[in-house]
Image (spheres, rainbow, N blue to C red):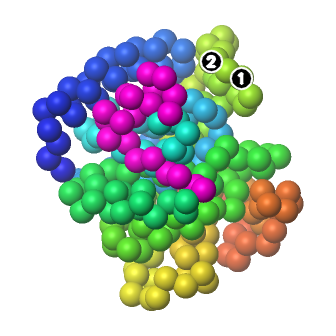
Amino acid sequence: MTESAGLRAGYFAAAAAVRPTLNAIMSKEWQGREHLPEDGFILCANHLSNLDPLALGHMVYSLGYLPYFLAKAELFQLPVVGGLLTRMRQIPVDRARGGNESLLTANQVLADGGAIIIYPESTLTTDPDLWPMKAKTGAARLALETGVPVIPVAQWGIHEVMPRPARAPKPWPRRTGRIRIGAPVPLEDLRDSPLTRDVLDSASERIMSAITGELEVLRGEPAPSGRWNPRTARREPTPGRPGPGGALPDRGTA
């Protein structure tokens, strides 16, 4: 993607402020960077801490991409933060209006070869054991509409640096923020299908299952059977996921 000099300068200035701070408050471990395409892709990640976007943006920028986030519209109204998000062309999502405009903007970013970061759960997980929850369908819709690769990402340890509902990081004892990038989610068989609710739900669950699989590797334990539904506040059956005690997938090392 060809970005303007002004936009790159804005990212450089933001990185100059953010990266030293993150390096000071936690160690980092990044796995699986070989799975990132050259351009035009969607990163879908689990969400455990308000610090997640900075940590993930740090990684994406350090690996040579400009990160574009789909972020809730309310953030764009905040002093200083809102202006910075706007200048860096981040993508506001107005959930009260359905988010169609934001998807159009995201479509253009991807058509230009950009990298978009989405948290499919749309909020911090409320799963009691901090596993990924049932997803919204926005990420799946964008992926199927554009045909670009969807890359699953798992984050773990960052939530120990800034646990919910803390308002500031807790740098001591020093923690390690671990991010693991997985292989593209297989969605090819769904790309030519009408975007019905069943298709979008199926694509969304594949994305969340891929994220969960990478998180199992980071945590060194299998996810429980089923997926937490924040609307019902209970874990519901999920097709194709192993139950407790199932074997971890052999994903190798990065």
Give the image location of residue 30, x and y in percent. 44, 37
Residue 86's image quarter?
A: top left
| Residue 217 drawn at (x, y percent) | 60, 49
Q: Find residue 120 and report its image quarter.
A: bottom right
Where does the image place residue 33, in percent across and percent down from the top left?
Answer: 36, 46
Q: Amino acid at mark 1?
A: Ala
At 33% across and 70% down in the image, what residue appears?
A: 146
Tell me, yes or no, whether the highlighted magenta stretch contains residue 79: yes
Secondary structure beneath disc 2? loop
Label at residue 166: 1
The correct choice, above or below, for 34 with respect to 58 in the image is: below
For the C terminus, the image quarter is: top left
- Front-most of 84 and 141? 84
Callout 1 secondary element: loop
Front residue of this view, candidates 194 and 92: 92
Identify the residue at horizontal 18%, vertical 50% (top origin).
1
Q: Nearer the viewer, residue 93 or 203?
A: 93
Bounds of the magenta segment? 77-96
Estimate the x, y position of residue 215 in percent, counting from the top left.
Answer: 61, 49
How crowded is the residue under tag 1: few (<14 C-alpha within 10 Å), some, or many (20+)? few
Please name the residue shown 37% across and 16% down the image: 17
Q: Is residue 112 magenta?
A: no
Residue at image location 66% in from the left, 11% down from the top: 172
What amino acid is found at the position of numbered circle 2 in the picture? Answer: Pro
Report the disc number at residue 169.
2
Task: Indicate left or right for 210 with 185 as reference.
Answer: right
